[in-house]
Image (spheres, rainbow, N blue to C red):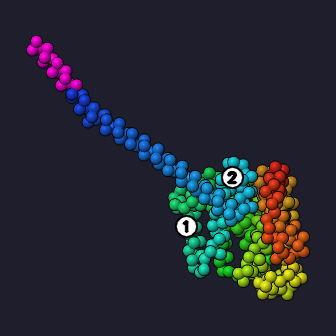
Amino acid sequence: MAAGISAKHGLLSSKTSLYHALHRQILPSICVQRAAEIQSVRAATSATTDSQFNEKYCLELVRSRDYDGFVSSLLLPEEARRSSLALRAFNVELAQVKDSVSQKTIGLMRMQFWKTAIEEIYRDEPPNQPVSAELWRTVRKHCLTKRWLLRIITEREKDLDDRAYRNLQELEKYSENTQSSLIYLLLECLGLKNVHADHAASHIGKAQGIVTCLRATPYHSSRRKVYLPMDICMLHGASQEDFIRGSREQNVRDVVYDIASQAHVHLQHARSFSSDVPAPASLAFLQTVVLEDYLQRVRRADFDVFHPSLKNRNPLLPLQLYFRSWKKTY
């Protein structure tokens, strides 16, 4: 009897020891592992949420400030669509510095932020800013050339001097370093490296820069600023005051005609490479539809850059962009 009781006590003692060992060693290990899993899930969820926020931020920024670029980006293949929006958001961020600062020093500080951001992006240490984060993702995915990104910043920085272009060549150089560089990056997002595509991109970028300068003339004039090439203005005897007043005289129209003609020449040069340019590259050149549309409308307005019809967006433009993307021509 006593032996049985002793055996039971021994068994109970053994179970108690096992129970305590379970609490001391196994359960804490399980709790730590579970906590790590929860933390990992939370981190992944947070990263996903941040990524979605960054993507939406860039999309809304481009849609509100570069609608033509927004529509063009949506027509790209899925693997390049988000990257295109990131690049265009980056371009918008830089473009709006000039108009959003009251002092050049502040503008230089913002440009320095982006120079530093690019260096950090290529070190895989992007700043905690939506456009920077999306740009980092784009750079990693497509191995983008850093030189093009820095060239855009450097040229935008020079443009903070807030003066008219001395001549058409200066405007073309600015356009090459900004708009053409952006198209080179879009080609890289599409996985295309072709010398003929690069030549076409160079001319399209120059045309886009020239047209952008013309399109913005009424807005700039309303703020008593004129950036049109001075040599062409002097050639036709048109003063800055003529543009500030919104003059629709023939000499002002002649200035617009000469500048618009140069944009048209660049488009023609770009198309001269079409037979040697890979068809998928045309998706990076969809802006030619927008350029054509403006040049046709300003011609119908007899090169009156202040004509009310030029203020309205062409409602058929998205459809025209879609049709051109389907044809894969530029």
**Type of amino acid at the residue the image marks with label 2:** Arg
Residue 183 in the image: x percent, y percent?
73, 60
Q: Residue furthest left?
A: 2
Query: Which residue occupies 14% across, 14% down?
Result: 4
Please tell me whether the stretch drawn in magenta is mainly helix, strand or loop: helix
Is 27 on the left or on the right of 310, as rendered? left
Residue type pointed to by label 1: Thr
* Residue tagged 2: 81
Q: Looking at the image, how many numbered discs can be counted on the residues?
A: 2
The span shown in magenta is 1-15
Is residue 55 left or right of 28 when viewed as pictured?
Answer: right
Residue 131 screen position, x and y as percent: 59, 61
Name the foreground residue: 59 vs 169.
59
Write down the residue under mark 1.
Answer: 116
Of 295 and 236, nearer the camera is 295
Is label 2 in a helix, a strand or a loop?
helix
